[in-house]
Amino acid sequence: MTEDTAKESNPREKHGMVKLTLYMAMEWRRAGVKNKKMPIGIDDFKEIITQDFYYVDKTGMIKELLDNWGKVNLFTRPRRFGKSINMSMLQRFFEAGTDESLFDGLTISKDTKLCEEYLGKFPVIAISLKQVSGKTFERAEANIWDIIKTEAGRFSFLLNSDRIDEEDKNELRNIRGGKGIIDSSLYHLSRLLQKHFGKKTIILIDEYDAPLQKAYENGYYDDMVRLIRQIFGYALKSNESLFFSVLTGCMRVSKESIFSDLNNPTMYTLVDEMCDEWFGFTDQEVKKLLADLRLEEYYGLTKDWYDGYRIGSTDIYCPWDVINWCRQLLLSSDREPRNYWVNVSENNIVYRFVEMADDATRHDLEVLSGGATVDKELSFELTYKDIYSSIDNLWSVLFTTGYLTVRGRNADGTYRLAIPNREILRVFGEQVKRWLLTQIEGGLQELYRAFDVGKAEEIEKYINICLKESISFMDGGNTEEQKEASYHTLLVGMAKGRRNWIVKSNREAGKGRADIILIDRQKNEGIIIEVKHTDDVKSLNAKAEEACHQIRERNYREYFPDFRIDRVKEYGIAFCGKECRVLANLA
């Protein structure tokens, strides 16, 4: 790697960038541009609107839901794709007594007839199950009771209603105290609300499948399936007090009969065109957001990193990524995109997928990492029990959870799958490297012995063996620096497997920065490694020589005076695809 790419930013430059950002913010205010805050971690629609947060208008979803009427509507989308905000928006729109001014100026307000008929006209039950967990079924069931009790607490005014008899009021008291029957609790709440308001009830259930995932992980899956099925059966099937319902989740787990008993629920999966634009940001919405914040110059970078999803017929950005990225651009001088979504999502699926990979799967991963597609059958009715029963099922899970996206469908019914963007490519690459190091752990001992005796040809031999076992993520990236960094990371991971080595990466030494420095305290030896990359296998030797020359020219050996080092070994290592060349200077 070059010295320039490893240099840290000048503190004065950083300070100047911060000052520039603050100056720009002041100029925007002078120009009358509203400097909205980014709604990081805020799922309450009312809070976003009233507290001056930026809102990407998704209220058009209300009209499309009503126009394409379904009694029970299920949306399956990956985590952090705006499900909770949309559910809050639906609650605020339909719920009796709502603040109608929340929707002033938004898309839905233009449909005055619809607003007159539906805005603030219905009782609404709204619960989220995403926090339900517990090591035992009893604990998880208690979590669900707590959620229902809290929601019932919002309806304490029913105790004073002259439209509800005393027996029904006692039913409400029991639910609020967690003493009733949990299976029928939502049904009874909807019935009491209809009696009071004279209108049927809307039921909103966010992240319905979260308890099922936790139940599978902790060994009480069948019990949780039974409980969810019974709650939904009472509340959503043949409930004369139900106007309509909306549920969200990551997966459609209908094989357990959670939904099969319902009357033809309407499913909105990632491949359905209806309502495809309401979860996640469209390209037009991202362009507007960046323009409103005067960040238009970052459109290309934003698209490269956070776009790439295909829902129905619409190209979609991950909204969690975009708002975090915009906040970073507004409040920091750091212009390097980060992995936001993968840091808050469950990556266990990727870990297991990589661990289960056979030769055919590894080939598919190579194809994906090169930006191409693989053809796979997808199942939209998996259970959590099915996920790890076959490597074929994991393609479906990676798709439904947002790690892969669809680029089209073939005549035989298979889907063309692809890695959506740079962010997801990076997480795949990191986990593949982790898997690779596990697979070659035994072979690393031979590599370590080759370093001990200083035989460059042996080091080269064993690194090449490791590369043959690897996947093409090792050569990922668009720039030379990114490609070198990938191999650099792989070598650092290998080196950290030896306990008696102290591993230093990108450390100041001599007149620059050394890629990798290893210190063997037992032998009082130091090792300096400089990494190069080339796209031409014929230039491997020249690149390795260039790396050795850089070590000497920049005098990286000066790093060692503070250590008791009797000998220093220098290695220039050049990579091209799955081949490397190692040259040594052992003087």
Image (tube, rainbow, N blue to C red):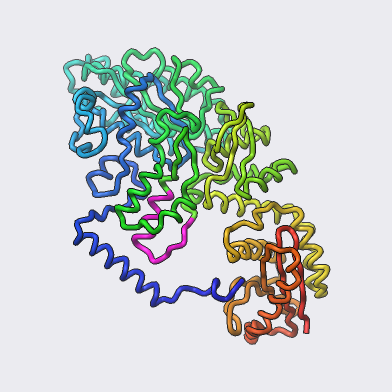
Q: Tell me if residue 74 comes above or below residue 278 in the rendering.
A: above
Q: Nearer the viewer, residue 273 or 90?
A: 273
Q: Nearer the viewer, residue 214 or 283?
A: 283
Residue 511 in the image, given as x and y percentages of width and height: 58, 84
For the magenta stretch, what is the residue range? 321-338
Quadrant containing the N terminus is: bottom right
Residue 188 in the image, given as x and y percentages of width and height: 33, 19
- Please say whether residue 323 is one of the residues in the magenta stretch: yes
Q: Residue at x 68, y 33 (%)?
A: 390
- Please say whether residue 91 is one of the residues in the magenta stretch: no
Q: Residue at x 45, y 51 (%)?
A: 303
Q: Nearer the viewer, residue 542 or 106?
A: 542
| Predominant SS along the magenta part | helix
Q: Does residue 122 appear to the left or right of 290 in the view shown?
A: left
Q: How many marks?
A: 0
Q: Does residue 483 appear to the left or right of 246 in the view shown?
A: right
> Can residue 113 be seen from the camera position used here?
yes
Q: Does residue 20 appear to the left or right of 312 in the view shown?
A: left
Quadrant containing the C terminus is: bottom right
**Quarter residue 2 falls in:** bottom right
Q: Residue at x 29, y 48 (%)?
A: 54
